[in-house]
Amino acid sequence: MRNTAPQLAVPPPGRGFGWVDLLVVVGLVGLLWTALRFGQGMLVHFDADAMPALDSSPTAIPYYAGRTMLRMWIAFGCSLVFAVAVGYLAAKYRTARALILPALDYNAKTRKVFVPGDEDSGTDPPPQTTPAP
């Protein structure tokens, strides 16, 4: 069949390595380097008796912020893997669904943080004792 509208024809995509590809590779290498740089001290054994000194200079703030962001991305990745795995199991298997859905419902309805003396925590505050006159 002959194409009667050549202006609508889509040219085949180029197969070469362009500047956008180079930009993506440089970005990925930079991201990998950043993750390795911020994560270099994360596998150190924690010992409360031999804690390293905390550098409170303003030049250390980006490093600490980067480590915090790395920990947040690691937690997000774990949460995403867990959510997809639980969703897959609940969608695929009837027995898993019968266990997972009530557990998630209960988990959504209960409070996770216990605050002593909070009226919503289900416990009464400790009695106030006043000294005798």
Image (spheres, rainbow, N blue to C red):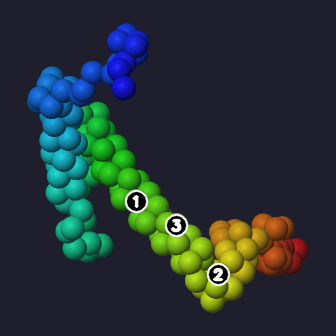
Of residues 34 and 60, the one drawn nearer to the viewer in this rendering = 34
SS for callout 2 = helix
Spatial separation of the CA atoms under disc 3 and disc 1? 10 Å
Residue 97 is left or right of residue 50, and the answer is right
Mark 3: which amino acid? Answer: Ala
Q: Identify which residue is drawn at 17% across, 52% down.
A: 36
Label whose residue precedes the other's in the sequence (3 or 2): 3
Of residues 44 and 109, the one drawn nearer to the viewer in this rendering = 109
Q: Would you name the residue on which mark 3 appears?
A: 83
Q: Identify which residue is drawn at 82% across, 68% down.
A: 120
Q: Identify which residue is drawn at 73% across, 74% down.
A: 105
Residue 14 on image: x %, y %: 18, 27
Residue 93 on image: x %, y %: 58, 83
Spatial separation of the CA atoms under disc 3 and disc 2? 14 Å
Q: Residue furthest bottom?
A: 95
Dot 2: within a 10 Å radius of its alpha carbon, few (fewer than 14), some, or many (20 or more) residues?
some
Of residues 131 and 101, the one drawn nearer to the viewer in this rendering = 101
Q: Would you name the residue on which mark 2 appears?
A: 97
Residue 122 on image: x %, y %: 81, 76
Q: Identify which residue is drawn at 38% across, 53% down.
A: 73
Which of the 4 quarters of the picture holds residue 51?
A: bottom left
Label whose residue precedes the other's in the sequence (1 or 2): 1
SS for callout 1 = helix
Spatial separation of the CA atoms under disc 1 and disc 2? 23 Å
Dot 1: within a 10 Å radius of its alpha carbon, few (fewer than 14), some, or many (20 or more) residues?
few
Q: Would you name the residue on which mark 1 appears?
A: 77
Which of the 4 quarters of the picture holds residue 59?
A: top left
Q: Is residue 112 above or below residue 61?
A: below
Of residues 78 and 72, the one drawn nearer to the viewer in this rendering = 78
Mark 2: which amino acid? Answer: Arg
Q: Residue furthest front?
A: 1
Q: Is residue 53 above or below residue 81?
A: above
